[in-house]
Amino acid sequence: MLGSMAAIWLTFLLLFVLFITAIVVSISPMSKGPVEIEKGSVLCLDLSSPISERKGPVSIQDAIAGTLGSTQYLCDITDAIYRAAHDSRIKGIYIKADGAAAGIASMQAINEALNYFKSQPDKWIMAYGDSYAQTDYYMSSSADELWLNPQGEVDIHGLSGTVLFYKGLLDKLGVNMQIIRVGTFKSAVEPYFLTEMSPASRLQNEVYMNSIWSSIKDDIAENRGVKSETVNQWADEFSFVLPADSILSRGIVTNIGYRHQAEKRIAELAGKDKYSDVNLVDVNEYAAAQDLTDYSYLPEVKAPKKNKNTIAVLYAVGEISDIGNEGIIGNEMVDQIFELTENSEDLVGLILRVNSPGGSAFASEQIWEALQQFKEKTGLPFYVSMGDVAASGGYYISCSADRIYAQPTTITGSIGIFGMIPDIQGLMNDHLGVTTSTVQTNPNGDFPNIMRPMTPQQAEKMQEFVERGYDTFTRRVADGRHISQDSVKVIAEGRVWDGATAKKIGLVDRMGSLRSAITDMAADLKLKSYRVETYPKVEGEWWESLLTMEGINAASMTNLDPETMRLYQHLERIKNAPRVQCKVETIIIK
């Protein structure tokens, strides 16, 4: 018996070692040494995978699923393009358009970087696509030569936004979502008590979406040398059904040809006899071969000495939560800000990079206060750079910045508060036949109780609670933007704005990317040399995650399809959501 038990334990130990070895092997290709950048190289931007804000810890879930390395990172892409613009070894950029998924502001940042690259002497950009989705076409439209497969298509259709509504499902289940909110336009809770957009929600969505599309089509028009109205015509005439010769005659692309013909042209531009001779350098490989902290590749910047003149870039990406393992965790972000405050000897400024729809009102307030401590104790400049979305709680943590940057297509604003408490009495009593009986010493001893609806007194007190949170939120914005609280309330009410309009109404200071914020801060401080450090650090966490099995849940281990996984995650967020939230609605834009 003892021998059998020993054999079983040894087997488990051997399997565990093999499991770790397999994951290490799957991760190791990602950590290979830097590639050699030869003179005459071509930078390759492969638009065939999702583009995220920034690389995070290696996920064991991804390692098991075999999806490591399937995501690209905006910071690496833009850094690589800007650096290559001043790198004499890089002759041009080859864009492989093949179905990239990215936020609209991220696409705009890449478009800006590509235009900067093309503006430098003796630099060229060429793109090829079997077919171009609208995202691919937007990012490729700045190319000097835009190639399309003879049997391919270009899909330019404008923008649309879809919101999923759950009231019908909740009614069938016997669940009533009790909503307390402040703000006519605070539509994040509408899916739980309406079956379609309210007039206010539809109005704000139409306004900001039209403004965002205007920015996109203007960029495309400028890139292709046509009028903005022409791009609208392309969208209205179902561009994806047009034959290749019509697409060419309209100026949507510059060349029609198969992939091997496009590759032959790449070889010509690179000064090589054949495509196989071209030294193609992947964007991620190029970024890995450079020192991302050193901006001395710019003509006006000198290499800094050690860690002096460091601009800290702190990433705040994802939903804001009080606890958890993903997104912006309140206590963890506060601790990171305090650490930067206490170790600010070499810092010259802080830039908060925000890409967040908001979340917990409490956690947002804690992060806001920590940033106030940084400003007061260090006296250093504090800027904010907004990504695809910096709304509700995302704007809450941004509003005290000395200067706020956004892309014209950034989703921001949504200054409002709501609370949401489910009442599942109907589900339990009527559908499942489960009843409850409660004993309490005080009338509200069991509040909140999801097994029965709120009393009128409880609803009144919750409304007061939410309104107090709204007053705090609008006061924070008023103090940060140096305007009256009444002025803030006029543009608040939970209304969502695009970045361009947000600048007009005073919620944003300047249009620009993260790079704009960095270079402007250096110029404002009259720095001749500086470096950039990004936080939080993400080193060495994969094996810790493995040992604790952290981040692996039942849903992820069952290989749920993407739609079911999204629903599962949505229900998990509802279950774990704080009582009071400042969060923008989820709208699927395509």
Image: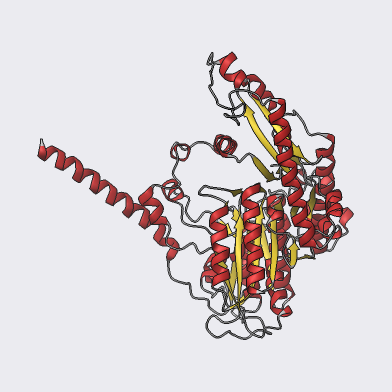
Please tell me which residue is depicted at 84% across the width and 38% down the height of the picture.
Answer: 200
Locate the C terminus and report the quarter of the image it occupies. top right
Where residue 302 sits: x, y (%)?
62, 86
Please tell me which residue is depicted at 69% across the width and 49% down the height of the picture.
Answer: 152
Q: Indicate the quadrant where residue 271 lies.
A: bottom right
Please tell me which residue is depicted at 49% across the width and 56% down the height of the picture.
Answer: 69
Depth order, front residue of 450/109:
450
Is residue 405 at all visible to an observer of this figure?
yes
Q: How many marks?
A: 0
Where residue 502 sits: x, y (%)?
81, 56
Where residue 36 sits: x, y (%)?
49, 75
Depth order, front residue of 99/554:
554
Is residue 251 at all visible to an observer of this figure?
no
Please tell me which residue is depicted at 57% across the width and 34% down the height of the picture.
Answer: 571
Q: Is residue 273 above or below residue 257?
A: below
Q: Indicate the quadrant where residue 53 lies.
A: bottom right
Q: Is residue 103 above or below residue 124?
A: above
